[in-house]
Amino acid sequence: MDMKISPSILASDYANLQSELKKIETSDLIHVDVMDGHFVPNISIGAPVVSAIKKVCSVPFDVHLMISDPLKYAEDFASAGADIICFHIESDSDTEETVNKILSLGKKAAIAVKPGTDIDSVIPFLDRLSMVLVMTVEPGFGGQSFMEGVMPKIEKLRALGYKGDIEVDGGVNPETIKIAAKAGANVFVAGSAVFKSENPEDTINLLRKNAADAL
Ligand code: DX5
Ligand code: ZN
């Protein structure tokens, strides 16, 4: 299975997004954290910013919606240039309708689960998802510690025969990535680990290598 690195621009310098994106142009995906100040306490960025950076970046966008009503905004993010639209099963939107909406917009659909949410909740949708995001921190803030305790959820998805992508998000660094890869994850979000490092490109290579070697 391909190991994909998805740096989170939440940890980047928003005053210089274009040059920040240039630093991570060898990554597999760009992780865009969208927060509405309601589903999570913070407000980050919205569709207009996604649309602006799409014009200066050719790496596919992995858009993580931490918002209460993803059904309402899916179309805005699809038009803005999201390639994968990931929403939380704990949001207020109907899960079935939201998955169908994203697919009808011609985008890949993904569902995210918070650390406390049972992974069984995503089982009915697996056949239509290109990715499941298993959060390894409580959503809302960068720079938190990786929660190893959620690994059994990833193992369970693989044991059920799920062959799509499994992403982990939160506290991923060159050490914790090995734990997640062993459990069966293959897409790795890294915010602080990439953007706070001296050489983001080297860090991306190291993350990819450590994930592959862990298997
Ligand atoms: C947290 C966000 C993450 C965050 C990860 O709510 O979903 O994507 O940016 O940041 P790090 O890698 O610093 O833990
Ligand atoms: Zn995220």
Image (cartoon, rainbow, N blue to C red):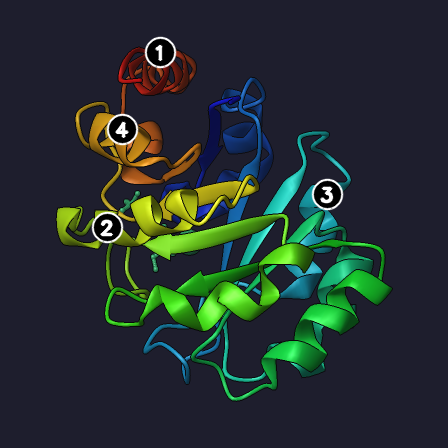
Whether residue 156 is situated above or below residue 20 in the rendered picture: below
Whether residue 150 is situated above or below residue 25 in the rendered picture: below
| Closer to viewer: mark 4 or mark 3 | 4
Q: CA distance from mark 4 to mark 1?
A: 13 Å
Foreground pick, 81 / 167: 167
Packing grade of label 1 (10 A; few <14, some 14-19, many >=20) is some
Residue 182 badge: 4
Q: Amino acid at mark 1?
A: Lys
Q: CA distance from mark 1 to mark 3?
A: 27 Å
Residue 209 badge: 1
Whether residue 6 appears in this view of the structure is yes
Q: CA distance from mark 1 to mark 2?
A: 23 Å
Identify the secondary structure beneath mark 2.
helix
Residue 152 badge: 2
Q: Amino acid at mark 2?
A: Pro
The answer to whether mark 4 is within 8 Å of ligand 1 is no
Query: Which residue shows up at 32% across the image and 64% down it?
Result: 139
Residue 152 at x, y = what percent? 23, 50
Residue 117 at x, y = what percent? 31, 72
Q: Place residue 178 in its image quadrant.
A: top left
Q: Amino acid at mark 4?
A: Lys
Q: Is residue 36 left or right of residue 85?
A: left
Confirm or deny contact between disc 2 and disc 4 (CB under 8 A).
Answer: no
Packing grade of label 3 (10 A; few <14, some 14-19, many >=20) is some
Q: Earlier in the sequence, mark 1 or mark 2?
A: 2
Q: Which residue is mark 3?
A: 54
Confirm or deny contact between disc 1 and disc 3 (CB under 8 A).
Answer: no
Foreground pick, 37 / 183: 183
Identify the secondary structure beneath mark 4.
helix
| Closer to viewer: mark 3 or mark 2 | 2
Foreground pick, 98 / 68: 98
